[in-house]
Every structure is written in structure tokens, then in C-alpha cells.
Amino acid sequence: MNTDNANLLAVPFAGGVLRPLVVTDSAALAELANDRDIWLNLRDAFPHPYRRDDADAFIAFVQDLPSEAALAIEVAGAFAGVIGATRGSDVQACGAEVGYWLGRSFWGRGIATDALSAFRDWLFSDTDLLRLFALPFTDNTASCRVLEKSGFQKEGRLQCSAHKAGAVKDQFVYAAIRAAL
């Protein structure tokens, strides 16, 4: 297990905490993630249906990655979803793509906005990242609103940039830049 991940202090946000994923999250992860509406807005690496074996494999995989790769979103002691960042490589190593999802029962309460804001602040204060970005599908208005309310700026539109569930989709590019360079 990555010792940075194991020693990560919890990142608090209004109503919850971001923390490392642990084996005991597996059942809740599988239950919440097995929702076609969540899958429709994520990359195909996120399986559907989402089974307990998928949750176990994901948790085992991220435990050996840098702490920012994937964190549990916990609300009132309950597993609510996942947030993470994938650092770029080579000349783009100064940036990372962020992604997040919440279980349906946690939607519409501002949790994603608060979690993403806390995650952004933590990444900019505790890592050397200069740029965070996200690529939501243009029809994912809820995620676009979360990004905007979390201080991300829309930089553009990538036309015909993704293929999901048998449809070609456009994506927006949203970014947040470290304020103090």
C-alpha cells in the first residue's frame, strides 16, 4: 500500500470528508456505482453493471497509487462516492484531470460542489499541480454546474470527442489554475 495514501489526513468539506478508500467501502461502492445513470456520464473504464468484484479490484488498484488518484467521499459517516485526479505525463505533468461521482441518494444536496472545492484546494496546497481540468459530456448539465460552482472556468468545447453508449458526444473543457504562481 502506498504510504502517502495510508497517512493522508482526511480532507474535510462542508458535510463530509475526503479520505482514502478502504476495503470496507467495497459493498457500498458496488451498490452505489451500479447505476446506469452514473455510468452514462463516466468513462468506459467504469464498468456497468458494477459488481462487488469491480469494487474490490478498484480499491486494491488505487491503494498503490498516489493519494490524489482516488479518494472516498464520505457524508455523515456513509460512503457517498469517489473523487480523484489523474496527473498528466511528460510536459503535461503539471496538470491533472479530475473526476468524481456520487451515489444517486446524495444528488442535489451540494455535496459534489463542496467535495470538489475541498479537493481542488487540497491539490493546490499539497501538490505541485498548476492546473486541474475536467471533460464532462456537454449534456451532463449537473456536472458542468458543479465545476462552475467549484471555481472551474469553461475553456472550450471538444466536438465529437467521445463515444458513449452508442452515441458520439461532445465534451466541455473546464479548468482551474493555481492562483499563486
Image: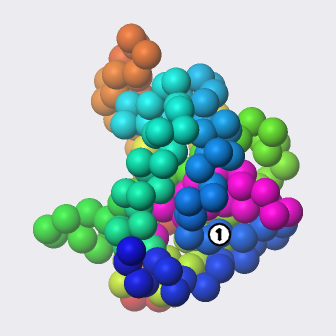
- Residue 5 inside the magenta-drawn segment: no
Which one is in front, 177 or 101? Answer: 101
Q: Residue at x 44, y 31 (%)?
A: 47
The magenta segment is 68-85
Which one is in front, 156 or 43? Answer: 43
Which one is in front, 152 or 95? Answer: 95
- Residue 76 inside the magenta-drawn segment: yes
Count neighbours of disc 1 (C-alpha within 10 A) and say few if under 14, some if 14 to 19, many if 20 or more.
Answer: many
Look at the picture and state if 126 lies above or below 147: below
In the rendered image, the quadrant that contains the N terminus is: bottom left
- Give residue 71's position: percent from left, percent from top: 55, 64
Q: Residue at x 63, y 27 (%)?
A: 35
Coloring scheme of the render? rainbow
Tell me the amino acid under the disc marked 1.
Leu
In the rendered image, the quadrant that contains the C terminus is: bottom left
Look at the picture and state if 107 lies above or below 2: above
Look at the picture and state if 139 lies above or below 75: above
- Give residue 78's position: percent from left, percent from top: 78, 57
- Give residue 29's position: percent from left, percent from top: 62, 46
Instruction: Kindly identify which residue carries mark 1.
Output: 18
From where the camera sits, is residue 71 visible?
A: yes
